[in-house]
Amino acid sequence: MSLEAMTGAGVVAFWVMLLLRLPGVLRQREFRNMYFSVVTLGLSVTLYYPPVALYLAELFGSARPCNVGMNIWGMLTCGAVLVLVARELLPKAVVYVYVLAAAVMVVIAVMAQTVSQTSVGCATALALPWWDPYWWVICAMWIFATSAGGVLCAKCIKVAAGIPALTVSMVCFLIGFASSAVFWAGIFVYLLARPTWVLTWLPVILCVHIWSYTLGLAIGVGSSLVGWMKTLGTMRGRMWLLRHLDALAAGAGAVGYERDVYRALWRDFAQNQRLGVYRAEVQILDAVSVLGDAGSPTGARLAALTHSPEGLDASGEIDFDKLERYVRELNQEAKSDGSVQNG
């Protein structure tokens, strides 16, 4: 696979992972500006990817993909990243960042129409003087914005300490910001000294850039999936326990007992996992109370276990896993008389 194809695959994978990760991103308020910065730069890479850039150039009637519109878009991207960083690190500076971004875009637009008309295009494909102010401004803005994003990412890594998956995701994002800064520093070095090896490494750096973001999002998706599966297992255990407690309380083995309640609990779980588990646990406590009030020996033992030190976890809360194990033991002991149904 060619390097350009790998970059294109990274672009596609980035948006797929972003769509899968979006619900979790919107819930993580403390990292939201970080994620939005990643999305902003991911969008920029997408638009600069050659097939997309060529399509946009044809769509807007431009003779070449590298035009002043793309350069201004780049400055808008930098401004957006700086605003997101300022909102997180220096809220009082947000207004000044807006002014800076607007001023830079105006300067680039004016220069492109006046003193730097020959500088508009792809910096690595033009015979530009080493002191070209148009590209100096562009490179400086990109390096400043991506470096600021790296600072925000470093803060997020510190905040995420103790959460391995989130920490690794943030490290991937940091690599992405750093690679972007290196990319634009490489263009600046090329303007100054024209080393040909820079042209060889720029596509590699761009590929690393987009795949770093994609990997960071993919780790988040994988972590969320593992957490969801774990919570699903917990919910299934709670529902098994509730069904068997209800069967005990009913004095029969009808698994369909309280079927509407079970459906409602699964609907709650589908909408909000924690809420579904919590409501299932409330129903379990109600079922234990009913059993305790019924006066049966089994119900009395269950009620006693629920409120005894043996039935509590380390934090002093009711340990539903212990309760489930106890009911499973009862289920094994009482298979023959049908007082507890096999599940």
Image (spheres, grey):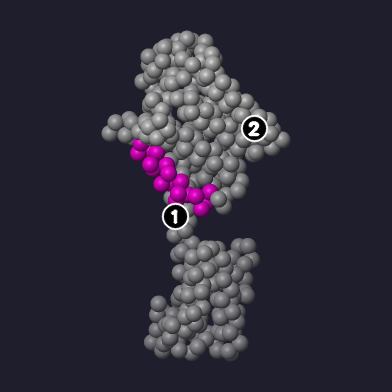
Q: Which residues are magenta?
A: 8-25
User: Is residue 28 visible in this depiction of the protein?
Assistant: yes
Q: Main secondary structure of the magenta part?
A: helix
Quadrant of residue 252 within the rendered picture:
bottom left
Camera-nearest residue between 60 and 245:
60
User: Is residue 149 visible in this depiction of the protein?
Assistant: no
Q: Residue 328, percent across and down? A: 45, 76
Q: Is residue 237 above or below residue 211?
A: below
| Identity of the residue drawn at 71% across and 35% down | 92
Q: Earlier in the sequence, mark 2 or mark 1?
A: 2
Q: Residue 166, percent across and down? A: 52, 45
| Identity of the residue drawn at 55% across and 76% down | 284
Left or right: residue 150 compared with residue 60: right
Which label is found at residue 225?
1
| Identity of the residue drawn at 28% across and 34% down | 1
| Identity of the residue drawn at 50% across and 50% down | 22
User: Which amino acid, mark 2?
Assistant: Tyr
User: Which amino acid, mark 1?
Assistant: Leu
Magenta span contains residue 170: no
Q: Secondary structure at mark 2?
A: helix
Q: Is residue 338 above or below residue 109?
A: below
Q: Which callout, 2 or 1, points to the residue nearer the camera?
A: 2
Q: Residue 238, percent across and down? A: 50, 71
Near mark 1 (Cα within 10 A), the count class, few <14, some 14-19 or many ≥20, is few
Instruction: State the residue position of label 2.
Output: 98
Magenta span contains residue 11: yes
Q: How many numbered discs, if any?
A: 2
Camera-nearest residue between 230 and 220:
220
Quarter of the image that includes the C terminus: bottom left
Asked if labels 1 and 2 touch by Cβ distance under 8 angstroms, the answer is no
Camera-nearest residue between 248 and 50:
50
